[in-house]
Amino acid sequence: MEKHGDEIEVTEREASNKPRTSHNVRIVLAVSLLLAIVVLSLVWIIPALS
């Protein structure tokens, strides 16, 4: 942020207020979802086979 007289200049990143995290959160959520689906499917399928 820079001040020139009465004007204040901010960059797009400063103005947008977006978090600076990477896409790791999406990857963790996707892997967790897939793992939960696999585990719950196995819990349901294995007893059904016997």
Image (cartoon, grey):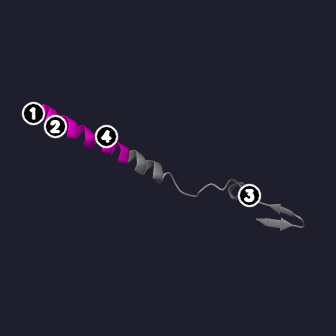
Residue 35, x across and y down, in percent? 31, 45
Q: Identify the amino acid type marked 1.
A: Ser
Could you tell me the amino acid type at mark 3?
Thr
Q: Which of the two marks, 4 or 3, is nearer to us in this view?
A: 4
Q: CA distance from mark 4 to mark 1?
A: 21 Å
- Looking at the rendering, which quadrant does residue 19 occupy? bottom right
Q: Is the residue 11 above or below the residue 3 in the image?
A: above
Residue highlighted by disc 4: 37
Query: Crowdedness of circle 1 by 10 Å Cα count: few (<14), some, many (20+)?
Result: few
Q: Is residue 2 above or below residue 39?
A: below
Q: Position of residue 22 (x, y in %)?
A: 52, 54
**As shown in the figure, which amino acid type bears the numbered disc 4?**
Ile
Residue at position x 46%, y 52% in the image: 25
For the record, the magenta segment spans: 32-50
Instruction: Give the left or right position of residue 25, taking residue 8 as reference.
Output: left
Q: Residues within 10 Å of mark 3 (few under 14, many from 20)?
A: few
For label 3, the residue is: 11
**Whole-number angstrom distance, CA of label 2 to CA of label 4:** 14 Å
- Disc 1 on helix, strand or loop? loop
Q: List the residue tagged with mark 1.
A: 50
